Image: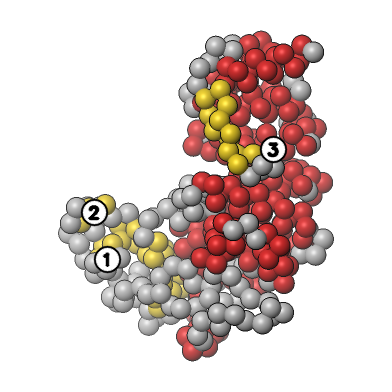
Amino acid sequence: MKRTPRCPFCQQPVAPPQNLGFQFADMDAGFCECGAVYVSDVTGFNRGAAFVEALFLATGGRWELAWDLIPGEDYRETVLEHYDQVSHQIVPEGHFEGRKVSGILYFVRLAEDLRALGEKDLEEIRRRRKRPESPPSSRPRKLRRAEAEKLVREGRFEELRLLCRHQPLNLRMLQKVLYHPDRALRFRTVRYLGELARDLAEEIPEEIADLVKRLLYASADSAASAWGALEAVGEIVRVLPRRFGLYVRNLLAFLAYPEFRPAALFALWRIAERHPELLRREKPFRLLEFLGDENPEVRGLVLLTLKALGLKETASGVQKLRGDQAHFEIYLPEKDDFETLKIGELAARILEEWRN
C-alpha cells in the first residue's frame, strides 16, 4: 500500500523534492526540519550520484568538508526504496498506475556537532540564485550537467580543459555525463577524461587521483550506474602509467563479473596497446578463459587484447574462433567513431600477423 515518505531520522513527512536552482544541483532535492537532506533518483540506478549530491548539499557545498567526513561518525545515510516522484509516494509493490516504480530518496544527515555548520551554509546557499548565463570568462565556474553534455557533444575539448583547470570540480560533472544513455556521448566523455588527466596531471594531481578512485568506486557500487567508468580508468592508466599502472589489477578483478567484463576488457585493451608490460606482469594468460564467453563483445575484446600483448603462445585458442560468425561493435577513440568487427575475421588477421 502506497504511503507518503517520511524522514528516516525524525519520522516526519517530507515535502516533494524540487529543482533547487543551484548550479551544482542536478537532481531534485529537499530539506527536512531535522537537518536531513534528501535527493531523488527517479531511476534508482544512480545511487552513487544521489549520495554525492546529498552529501554536498548537507555540507553546504563544501567539497573539502564533504570528503573529509567519516561515515557513521560524521554523518548517517539511508535510502527509501520504491519512491514515485510523480505522486510523491512510496509504492512497496513497485508498480503504480501502470508505471514501474524504481526510484529512491537518498537521505543524509550530519552529526549534531556538524549540523549547525551545515545549516548555516545551507541558508546561504538557499539565498543564492543561478549563476549568470554569461559569467566573465576569467572567473572559475562550475558546469551544470546539461552544459557539460553540450560541450562534449560539440567536441569543445579546449573549453572543457580550461574549465577543469580553473575549477577541478568540473571533472565530477564530466563523470556524470558517463551516465548518459547516448553511447557515443559516453565514449567521447571517456576519451576526454583520459586526455584531461594527461593534460592536468601536473597541475591538479590530487584531483586526478581522486577522479580515478571515484570511477572505481562507481563501478564497485553495484547499485550505481557505472557506464563508462572502467573505460575511463583505462584511458587514464594508458596516459599516466607510472602513476596509475597498479590499477590494472583492479581492472582484472572486474573480469570475474559478467556485467563488468566488456568495460574492463575495453580498458585493458587500451592499456595493452600502449603499455603491454603492465598486463604482462599480471598473468595475462587468464584472459584465455574468456575466449569462450557467450558475449561476442567479450570474445572480440579478448582477441584485441591478446593481439596488443603479442601473446603468440595463445594462437591455439585464437584458432578456435576463426569460424566464429558473430560480430561486435567497438569504439575507436583515435577516430572518435565506432567500428563493427567480425570475430572470425579478426582471429584470422591476428593469426596471419603472428605467422609473419
Distance from Cα at disc 1 to Cα at disc 2: 10 Å
- State yes or no: discs 1 and 2 in contact (Cβ < 8 Å): yes
| Residue shown at 26% from the left, 52% from the top | 100
* Residue placed under numbered mark 3 in the picture: 270
In this rendering, position of residue 98 left or right of residue 159: left
User: Residue 347 sits in which quadrant?
Assistant: top right
**Residue 15 can be seen, yes or no:** yes
- State yes or no: discs 1 and 3 in contact (Cβ < 8 Å): no
* Residue placed under numbered mark 1 in the picture: 86
Whether 113 is drawn above or below 145: the answer is: below
**Residue 36 can be seen, yes or no:** no
In this rendering, position of residue 247 left or right of residue 123: right
SS under mark 2:
strand
* Residue placed under numbered mark 2 in the picture: 99
> The N terminus lies in which quarter of the figure?
bottom left
Q: Nearer the viewer, residue 100 or 31?
A: 100
Q: Earlier in the sequence, mark 1 or mark 3?
A: 1
Q: Is disc 2 surrounded by few (<14), some (14 to 19) or many (20+) residues within 10 Å?
A: few
| Residue shown at 66% from the left, 82% from the top | 136
